[in-house]
């Protein structure tokens, strides 16, 4: 698999580290415990399009949000995580 | 029975010569040069360009190996990588390579090849008796025969199976050869260099694309080398040679022969194995044996051709029974006739070509058995042309000849059987397009009723199939298709459609026909009487497939596992479709309904050595060396691995007899005078920006805003789930400038964590950070005389007094020789101590300087072991305590958790269960007898309690002999630990079967008041 890093161009997947679901949002401190449990532990495992965090560990150290089809590994878009978080 | 010919005809070819079956100079052979090789110790001759298979056939060797289960004599079936039978061991000693396919092994001068899976010799194999045990080895025998009694499995059944089954022997020694990896990029990758592949490469290059053409064979041309196809009045192979020459001259074309593209991966990535030096005795100096390529291609054209199918009939596995296409390869490319009297058995017109080629090579073609009724006009014409008897609607009902074919039983359309003497039977059951690479990535093949084979009708985007791989039946069609797809792929990869010139394609002189009529089960049930093999390599017969069907294992995936069909080196390349057809017939369904398995990479065997490349031995992982490494080695240190770091473990003196003695001395020196230790390996992160303090507040559990400039503080980080993640000190060097230290093990993980927090959680923070672990050499100088030593090093203008630079001080300093550095008053040992950091290039000089100026104080370098002893004596948690399962409460740091701010892990750390006082909590342990060794991992039980899980109350995490306390000491976690100081408990070590009594104490064994730190 190859990922198009917005800073480094298209690079081999071995340069990246996978983290997982990029759709979860960190709850507020006073959110109920259930919300925290959901954030920390529970993940959907969709067969199809998914947004995931990838870290360009052997490159620019950017955290990226990669939109990818988990069945075909087709990549639809790559954005920096900060861009996504700020949006 | 009616003998058509009682005896074989006299030998043709060069009688009395060493290669009696070499009839001519093949188009791929350098006949002017002779080389020698051995097979089972016998010296034989060959020519450059020969494969081991062609060389053996040239020398009249037909028996090459024994089969997997039944030890049946086997010869050479094919002329390519699909070979199931002719597997041999190559070379000797450490380079011995088992299960090598003779059909793709290039012969070189001095090659030593050995048959395998036979004892004592190939001709007289004792285990041939396995054939008599055939009922035992039927489908599913692994699951049925050896079921009970269970105790027999390890001692009786498994050794028997292992001895009886299996193929070659792996080398006993490490592989002495080198392997490497490389990456290449191109617009268009063409796999295969037959007519379609060459035309595609030429067209793509002509359209301006960067092209890589991979050919697994040593020569380009594909079937053009095997067939006598004339293209524009010249031999097809000559056109291939000229086209290759033309392509090689183009700057943007790379032709890689001996390179098998074995896998197709995501994003246009392909794996390929280049056999750089397999065809020579010894690789040249500096040359790898094989090279693993990752090829990144914009578009890919698969021109992989096809693989011919055998026909399933009784005793169809004898040496001398060969695929018709392979026969033509040997005759035309290698100039070898695989027999002297041949019979052709075919269900299509393509198979007939073998009759003409053999006839013209002087081989007598006794008969053409054509399963089609009526046979084609081509078959009738061919029979007349070569003077062979034609059996239209006929079948081969059986064969004879123990170690090589002697005769076949032909059943004519009327059902009458007659014996025909022959030593070669060329069979063709039709051809399968080689679509393996196209089916990687879960692209399912579909059955094409017209072609009688599986094809890929909708290949993945960017992938094109050309030539016979796409079902093109003639050379002309393959050329035209390759040409068109080459241009299309170039455009798909971004070439300008206007570029490139139209090229003239050659025309084949002959009209090539196929006219296949399916033939899956020639004799029906009757054909299952003997052993009618479907999968030669795994000894799977038609009967086995029928049995699997009867026993319910009819799903293709079950069929494969139950019968072992399609496994091992050939992956069923010649077997799978015949087996599916047999299963379809058994079930009364169509082949399309029965389905097929998809394949995974690699399409050909790939040595693990090539996948490992240079990552072996000490190069398996990179090594990191601290800046004082060279000095430490000179000083005689013993090295240890700390992750990928190589660190000094201790520095023995010549008079010391054990490491314990050395470590005791190092600890005593630090506690009584002064010592130093390289601590560069701790992670160092430089943090700057207006929001630097905010970031620290959010990643550490404790408060940071009020930390003054010029001070450092201990910090604890949690994971978001509330468990401890890492710890270290962070110093404030300026208003908005901090330098954080992490543990050695977590340096990378903490960096990644900070970046996650900053980029994903709080991108608005005005902060930047970078790892400076490698930029600074950092050395801990510890002991009551450490200040005296530093006074000799640090510029006099800097006030080192306790009042001016107290515990947890941090400052930019200048060394006496002018080098700028940083000084921290930190202590891991519990003594008055400093950590001094200088740019990494001065690390070595700093160590030597410390030795010199510290000599009057008896300065002692110490290693990781003494470091560990002293931190246990002081109760500082390290890796064994921060093991990912402990909380701040468990570590006795519950009170550090700020209640005034949000930080990573705060919400989850508050969970009731994580704050339970019954959770094992950090304590110290001292044995009642000082010399009783405490061992990390031991379980803590109440005194007198039974040694069972119910009584288990905790564990020892770290232990050491303390030369300061003069006793074994340990850190551990004990339920309700802090309330149990003074209690005597049992320390159970189930590995050694020992129980020791120890007293629970506070986890600080030396200077609990901290007066030494603050001295």
Image (cartoon, coloured by chain):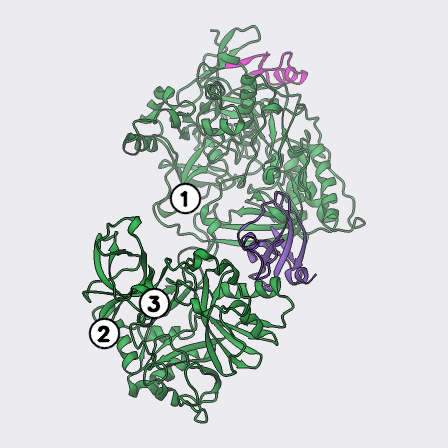
Residue at figure coordinates x 57%, y 8% from the top left: B413
SS label for mark 1: loop
Magenta residues (range):
B368-397
SS label for mark 3: strand
**Residues under labels 3 and 2: Cα distance?**
17 Å
Numbered disc 1: what chain?
Answer: B
Q: Quadrant of the C terminus of chain B?
A: bottom left
**In the image, B669: left or right of B776?**
left
**Residues under labels 3 and 1: Cα distance?**
45 Å
Residue B829 placed where, x, y %?
Answer: 34, 75
Numbered disc 2: what chain?
Answer: B
Residue B492 placed where, x, y %?
Answer: 73, 47
| The magenta stretch spans residue B384 | yes
Residue closest to the eye, B321 or B209: B209
Whether B843 is drawn above or below B66: the answer is below
Residue closest to the eye, B865 or B844: B865
Residue B597 placed where, x, y %?
Answer: 56, 31
**Residues under labels 2 and 1: Cα distance?**
53 Å
What residue sits right under mark 1 in the picture? B110
Residue B120 seen: no
What residue sits right under mark 3 in the picture? B639
Numbered disc 3: what chain?
Answer: B
Residue B49 placed where, x, y %?
Answer: 52, 40
Residue closest to the eye, A36 or B64: A36
Q: Which chain is purple?
A: A
Residue at figure coordinates x 33%, y 22% from the top left: B129
Whether B879 is drawn above or below B92: the answer is below
Whether B644 is drawn above or below B211: the answer is below
């Amino acid at each position: 698999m190859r990922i198009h890093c917005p800073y480094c161009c298209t690079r081999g997947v071995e340069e990246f580290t996978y983290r997982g679901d990029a759709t979860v949002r960190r709850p507020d401190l006073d959110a109920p415990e259930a919300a925290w449990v959901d954030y920390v532990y529970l993940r959907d495992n969709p067969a199809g399009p998914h947004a995931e965090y990838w870290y360009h560990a052997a490159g620019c150290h950017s955290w990226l949000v990669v939109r990818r089809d988990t069945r075909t590994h087709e990549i639809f878009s790559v954005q920096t995580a900060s861009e996504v978080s700020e949006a | 029975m009616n003998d058509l010919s009682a005896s074989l005809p006299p030998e043709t070819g060069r009688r009395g010569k060493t290669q009696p079956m070499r009839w001519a100079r093949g188009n791929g052979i350098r006949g002017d040069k002779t080389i020698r090789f051995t097979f089972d110790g016998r010296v034989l001759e060959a020519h450059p360009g020969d494969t081991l298979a062609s060389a053996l056939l040239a020398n009249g060797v037909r028996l090459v190996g024994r089969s997997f289960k039944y030890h049946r004599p086997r010869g050479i079936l094919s002329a390519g990588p699909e070979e199931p039978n002719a597997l041999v061991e190559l070379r000797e000693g450490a380079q011995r390579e088992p299960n090598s396919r003779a059909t793709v092994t290039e012969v070189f001068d001095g090659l030593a090849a050995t048959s395998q899976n036979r004892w004592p010799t190939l001709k007289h194999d004792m285990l041939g008796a396995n054939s008599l045990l055939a009922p035992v080895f039927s489908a599913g025998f692994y699951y049925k025969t050896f079921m009970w009694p269970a105790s027999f499995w390890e001692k009786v059944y498994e050794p028997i199976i292992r001895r009886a089954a299996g193929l070659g022997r792996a080398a006993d020694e490490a592989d002495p050869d080198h392997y490497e990896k490389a990456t290449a990029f191109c617009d268009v990758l063409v796999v295969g260099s037959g007519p379609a592949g060459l035309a595609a490469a030429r067209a793509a290059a002509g359209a301006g694309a960067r092209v890589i053409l991979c050919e697994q064979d040593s020569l380009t041309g594909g079937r053009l080398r095997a067939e006598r196809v004339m293209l524009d009045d010249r031999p097809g192979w000559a056109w291939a040679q000229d086209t290759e020459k033309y392509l090689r001259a183009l700057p943007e074309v790379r032709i890689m022969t001996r390179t098998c593209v074995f896998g197709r991966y995501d994003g246009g990535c392909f794996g390929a194995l280049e056999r750089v030096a397999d065809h020579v005795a010894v690789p040249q100096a500096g040359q790898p044996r094989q090279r693993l390529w990752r090829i990144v291609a914009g578009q890919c054209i698969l021109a992989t051709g096809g693989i011919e199918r055998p026909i399933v009939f009784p005793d169809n596995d004898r040496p001398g029974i060969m695929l018709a296409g392979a026969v033509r390869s040997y005759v035309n490319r290698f100039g070898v006739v695989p027999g002297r009297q041949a019979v052709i058995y075919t269900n299509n017109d393509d198979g007939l070509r073998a009759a003409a080629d053999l006839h013209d090579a002087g081989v007598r073609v006794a008969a053409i058995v054509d399963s089609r009724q009526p046979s084609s006009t081509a078959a009738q014409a061919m029979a007349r042309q070569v003077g062979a008897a034609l059996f239209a609607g006929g079948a081969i009902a059986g064969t004879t000849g123990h170690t090589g074919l002697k005769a076949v039983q032909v059943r004519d359309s009327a059902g009458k059987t007659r014996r025909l003497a022959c030593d070669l039977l060329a069979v063709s059951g039709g051809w399968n397009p080689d679509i393996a690479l196209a089916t990687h990535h879960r692209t399912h093949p579909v059955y094409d009723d017209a072609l009688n084979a599986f094809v890929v009708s909708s290949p993945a985007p960017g992938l094109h199939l050309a030539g016979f791989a796409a079902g093109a039946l003639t050379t002309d069609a393959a050329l035209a298709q390759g040409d068109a797809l080459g241009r299309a792929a170039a455009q798909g990869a971004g070439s300008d459609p206007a570029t490139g010139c139209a090229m003239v394609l050659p025309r084949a002189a002959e009209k090539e026909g196929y006219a296949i009529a399916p033939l899956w089960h020639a004799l029906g049930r009757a054909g299952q009487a003997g052993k009618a093999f479907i999968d030669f390599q795994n000894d799977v017969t038609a009967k086995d497939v029928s049995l699997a069907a009867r026993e319910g294992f009819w799903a293709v995936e079950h069929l494969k596992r139950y019968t072992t069909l399609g496994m091992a080196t050939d992956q069923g390349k010649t077997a799978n479709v015949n087996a599916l057809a047999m299963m379809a017939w058994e079930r009364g369904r169509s082949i399309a309904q029965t389905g097929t398995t998809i394949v995974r990479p690699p399409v050909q065997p790939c040595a693990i050595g090539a996948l490992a490349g240079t990552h072996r031995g000490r190069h398996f992982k990179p090594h990191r060396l601290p800046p004082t490494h060279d000095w430490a080695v000179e000083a005689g240190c013993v090295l240890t691995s700390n992750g990928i770091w190589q660190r000094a473990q201790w520095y023995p003196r010549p008079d010391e007899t054990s490491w314990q003695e050395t470590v005791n001395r190092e600890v005593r020196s630090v506690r009584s005078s002064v010592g130093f230790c390289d601590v560069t390996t701790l992670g160092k992160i430089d943090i700057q920006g207006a929001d630097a303090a905010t970031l620290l507040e959010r990643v550490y559990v404790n408060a940071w805003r009020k930390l003054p400039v010029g001070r450092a503080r201990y910090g604890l980080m949690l994971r978001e789930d509330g468990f401890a993640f890492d710890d270290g000190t962070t110093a404030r060097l300026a208003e908005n400038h901090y330098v954080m230290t992490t543990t050695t093990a977590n340096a990378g993980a903490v960096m990644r964590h900070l970046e996650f927090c900053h980029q994903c959680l709080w991108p608005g923070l005005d902060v930047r950070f970078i790892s400076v672990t490698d930029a600074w050499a950092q050395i801990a100088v510890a002991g009551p005389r450490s200040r005296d030593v530093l006074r000799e090093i640090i510029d006099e203008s800097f006030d080192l007094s306790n009042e001016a630079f107290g515990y947890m001080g941090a400052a930019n300093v200048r060394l006496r020789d002018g080098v700028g550095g940083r000084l921290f008053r930190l202590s891991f040992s519990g003594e008055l101590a400093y950590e001094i950091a200088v740019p990494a290039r001065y690390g070595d000089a700093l160590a030597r300087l410390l030795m010199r100026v510290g000599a009057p104080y008896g300065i002692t370098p110490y290693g990781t072991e003494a470091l560990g002893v002293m931190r246990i004596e002081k109760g500082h948690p390290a890796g064994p305590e921060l093991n990912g399962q402990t909380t701040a409460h468990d570590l006795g740091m519950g009170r550090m958790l700020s209640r005034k701010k949000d930080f990573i892990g705060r919400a989850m750390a508050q969970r009731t269960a994580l704050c339970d006082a019954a959770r094992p909590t950090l304590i110290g342990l001292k044995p009642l007898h000082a010399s009783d060794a405490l061992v990390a991992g031991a379980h803590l039980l109440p005194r007198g309690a039974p040694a069972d899980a119910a009584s288990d109350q905790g564990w020892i995490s770290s232990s050491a002999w303390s030369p300061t306390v003069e006793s074994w000491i340990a850190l551990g976690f004990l339920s309700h630990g802090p309330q149990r100081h003074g209690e005597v408990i049992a320390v159970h070590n189930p590995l050694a079967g020992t129980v020791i009594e120890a007293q629970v104490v506070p986890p600080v064994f030396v200077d609990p008041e901290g007066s030494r730190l603050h001295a």
